[in-house]
Image (tube, grey):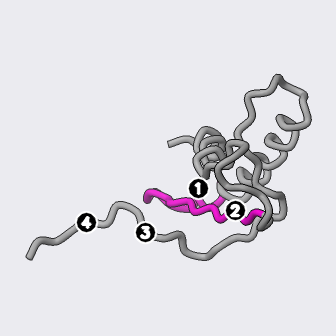
Amino acid sequence: MTCMTMIFGPPAGAVRLSVAPQLASWDKAGTPGQVRLADFLAHVDALARPVMAATTDRVAVELTVGLPDQMPLIDGGRDLDNYLFPIAQRLGP
């Protein structure tokens, strides 16, 4: 039997965001989508930085996005990666 090394595990201690997740936006600066994204990323950054600073280990991020039943998941760029990409860019490797 071989031993598998776990690189990442589920995050411990879930945090509920008080700002709604925002999709990546390629609109020009100052547009409503960019402003909402900047506010969301500032909120995520304020929550994540202390956790990241408190460890030298790798950190896993999990994001659960709830959408209304009538909102289609395959239209409008609502792929989960469009929510996670800006977070990954903001927090870095």
Q: Residue at x 31, y 66 (%)?
A: 6
Percent position of residue 91, x then y? 61, 45
Q: Secondary structure at mark 3?
A: loop
Q: Which residues are magenta?
A: 49-67
The residue wearing badge 2 is 65
Mark 1: secondary structure: helix
> Which residue lies under the disc numbered 4?
5
Tell which of 5 and 69 is nearer to you. Answer: 69
Q: Which dot, 4 or 1, sits closer to the camera?
A: 4
Give the residue number, with chain letter if any, for mark 3.
Answer: 9
Q: Which mark is residue 53?
A: 1
- For the point 76% across and 63% down, the residue is 67
Which element is circle 4 on?
loop
Tell me the kind of residue under disc 4.
Answer: Thr
Residue, x 64% and y 50% (percent of image)? 74
Amino acid marked by disc 3: Gly
Q: Nearer the viewer, residue 58 or 9?
A: 9
Q: Are marks 2 and 1 in contact (CB under 8 Å)?
A: no
Label 2–label 4 contact, CB within 8 A: no
Q: CA distance from mark 2 to mark 4?
A: 29 Å
Of labels 2 and 1, earlier in sequence is 1
Which amino acid, by three-letter code, is at mark 1?
Ala
Cα distance between the residues tagged 3 and 2: 20 Å
Circle 3 crowding by C-alpha within 10 Å: few under 14, some 14–19, many from 20:
few
Residue 39 shown left or right of residue 62 in the figure: right
Is 85 located above or below residue 11 in the figure?
A: above
